Image (tube, rainbow, N blue to C red):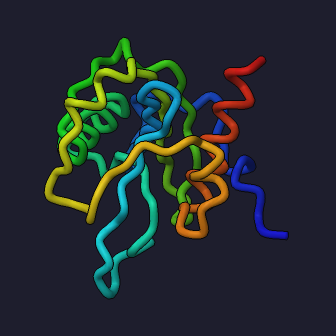
Amino acid sequence: MGKSHTRDYISGMSENTEFRGAKLALFVGSKLAVIMRDDRPGLVWAGHLDLPGGGREGRETPEACALRETREELGITLSDQDLVWKRCFRASTGEPVWFFAAHLPEARAAEIRLGDEGQYWQLMPAQAYFDHPRAIPHFAARVKMYLAQAAV
């Protein structure tokens, strides 16, 4: 069996600490927003189902990073108040990365527009993402962690 991605969790990490980037598990209605990554040679996780997010720019906070990346990639604007969960994890490089979750009403799906990255976006049940052969495993594990903690 593979490495447990929940062991990457870093407790007590401050938002002011240097970090590499942020991702967002964005639920629209009951479904998870995913982006099929471009399929270019050399691109990490090329042709896989990704979540909105990416690298930090300047001195932005983890929240600002996740919200900016979501706006750039899915064309939808969220606020800090939309973020309902956050955790810091260690990337494969060892650098801290942030992971957030947010829930929006189903009607907001009409606002979503694919940005300059990715082949397409779609909404899918979380379980379908977990089971999909092109889901990025460590992101699936983090969404599972969030859902398990949110259910408590």
Apparent side of residue 51 relative to residue 121 in the rendered image (left or right): right
Apparent side of residue 37 relative to residue 114 in the rendered image (left or right): right
Q: Position of residue 127 (x, y in %)?
A: 65, 46
Q: Residue furthest left?
A: 116
Residue under the image location 73 percent in, 20 percent down = 151
Quadrant of the drawing holding the C terminus:
top right
- Is residue 59 visible in this depiction of the protein? no
Residue under the image location 45 percent in, 25 percent down = 29
Report the front residue among 152 and 122: 122
Residue under the image location 72 percent in, 25 percent down = 149
Q: Position of residue 3 (x, y in %)?
A: 76, 64
Report the front residue among 36 and 24: 36
- Is residue 152 visible in this depiction of the protein? yes
Q: Position of residue 89 (x, y in %)?
A: 58, 45
Residue under the image location 31 percent in, 21 percent down = 107
Report the front residue among 112 and 15: 112
User: On the image, which quarter does residue 60 sit in?
Assistant: top left
Quadrant of the drawing holding the N terminus:
bottom right
Q: Residue furthest top?
A: 81
User: On the image, which quarter does residue 111 sit in?
Assistant: top left
Q: Position of residue 23 (x, y in %)?
A: 42, 44
